[in-house]
Image (spheres, rainbow, N blue to C red):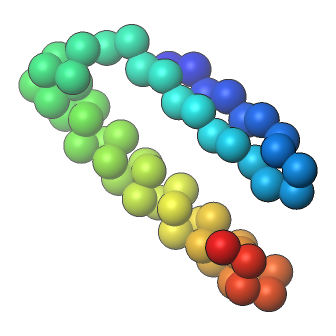
Amino acid sequence: MTVLFKAIGNQTSLSIHQTVPEEDAKRTGAYQRWIKMFNRLNQLISDQAEKLGGIK
């Protein structure tokens, strides 16, 4: 997995690239863990934005 953070003004772009085929990821359970990871990341970002004054 490759994760790239790129500054764009006062925001950050996040790109994630996974080389495992989706069918393999679903078969091994990795796909479900990715979804959980993205949901958790989204929650952390939302929580931090709220602390900074509602920036979304």
State the residue lying farthest toward the right.
Answer: 9
Q: Residue at x 25, y 35 (%)?
A: 31
Please indicate whether residue 35 sits to the left or right of residue 45 in the image. left
Tell me the quarter of the picture where residue 22 sits.
Answer: top left
State the residue lying farthest toward the front.
Answer: 9
Number of numbered labels in the structure image: 0
Tell me the quarter of the picture where residue 5 sits.
Answer: top right
- Residue 38, placed above or below residue 29: below
- Residue 8, placed above or below residue 11: above
- Residue 40, placed above or below residue 23: below
Locate the C terminus by quadrant: bottom right
User: Is residue 28 something that shows in the picture?
Assistant: no
User: Is residue 49 something that shows in the picture?
Assistant: yes
Camera-side residue of 35 and 9: 9
Q: Residue 49: x, y in percent?
A: 71, 75
Tell me the quarter of the picture where residue 24 sits.
Answer: top left
Camera-side residue of 21 and 7: 7
Please indicate whether residue 47 sits to the left or right of residue 40 in the image. right
Camera-side residue of 20 and 54: 54
Q: Residue at x 44, y 50 (%)?
A: 38
Q: Residue at x 80, y 87 (%)?
A: 53
Please indicate whether residue 31 sits to the left or right of residue 17 in the image. left
Q: Residue at x 72, y 85 (%)?
A: 54
Q: Residue 27: x, y in percent?
A: 10, 25
Camera-side residue of 36 and 16: 16
